[in-house]
């Protein structure tokens, strides 16, 4: 039995449509941070873009004059991958040891972080994912700037 103004079939159809719309808008499984960075290939591209930015930055480039950049590429990739939960093992030195004696000042630290932000833009990392990596790096400030 249904009321003449609003037949039961119509009510059921509307309900079905509402349920279907609700299902369609259920969030899909959220990609991990590592996936948002494009996995191993994405992190590799990011490390390349980062090194290009560092090489063009007058505030930091001299610090890398004697650095084996292939090794740096490997270690920074592993560190990022490890932080993002990508399962890589980081085999470089700890951050205090790696940076001691360089007299890194706050301007240099900020410059390097900006280089990283530009590198992340270069390889189209979504803003939210960028922010999450930066949040993980921020506490390292005291390890580099003394
Ligand atoms: C959040 C900021 C930073 C992160 C995450 C970071 C990360 C790293 C990592 C993973 C390494 C490799 C260590 C190893 O191979 O044992 C490294 C090395 C190095 N970093 Fe940083 N770093 C940061 C800030 C800086 C700053 C501000 C400078 C200087 C302007 C700097 C200069 C260097 C240099 C020159 C090396 C190579 C050292 C060598 O050749 O022995 N880093 N860094």
Image (tube, helix red, strand yellow):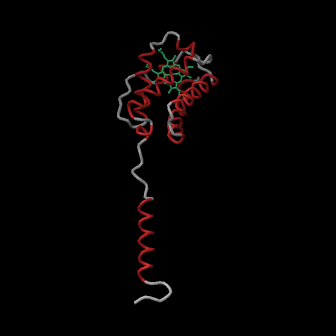
The x and y percentages for residue 13 are 42, 75
From the viewer's perspective, is 33 left or right of 111?
left
How many discs appear?
A: 0
What is the residue that sits farthest to the right in this orientation? Answer: 107
Residue at 44% x, 25% y: name it.
Answer: 76
Quadrant containing the C terminus is top right
Q: Is residue 141 above or below residue 58?
A: below
The x and y percentages for residue 47 are 46, 25
Along the line of sight, which residue is nearer the eye, 66 or 44?
44
Residue at 43% x, 30% y: name it.
Answer: 43
Quadrant containing the N terminus is bottom left
The x and y percentages for residue 140 are 52, 30
Along the line of sight, which residue is nearer the eye, 146 or 29?
29
The x and y percentages for residue 61 are 57, 15
Along the line of sight, which residue is nearer the eye, 70 or 102?
70
Along the line of sight, which residue is nearer the eye, 133 or 137?
133
Specify the quadrant of the image occupied by residue 22: bottom left
Residue at 41% x, 71% y: name it.
Answer: 16
């Amino acid at each position: 039995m249904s009321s003449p103004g609003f037949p039961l079939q119509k009510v059921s159809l509307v309900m079905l449509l509402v349920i279907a719309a609700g299902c369609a808008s259920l969030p899909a499984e959220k990609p991990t941070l590592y996936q948002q960075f494009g996995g191993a290939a994405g992190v590799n591209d990011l490390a390349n873009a980062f090194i290009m930015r560092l090489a063009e930055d007058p505030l930091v480039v001299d610090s890398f004059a004697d650095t084996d950049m292939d090794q740096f590429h490997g270690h920074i990739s592993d560190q990022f991958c490890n932080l993002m939960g990508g399962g890589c093992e980081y085999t470089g030195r700890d951050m205090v040891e790696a940076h001691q004696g360089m007299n890194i000042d706050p301007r240099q630290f900020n410059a390097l972080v900006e280089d990283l932000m530009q590198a992340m833009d270069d390889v189209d990392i979504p803003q939210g994912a960028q922010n999450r990596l930066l949040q993980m790096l921020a506490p390292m400030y005291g390890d580099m700037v003394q």
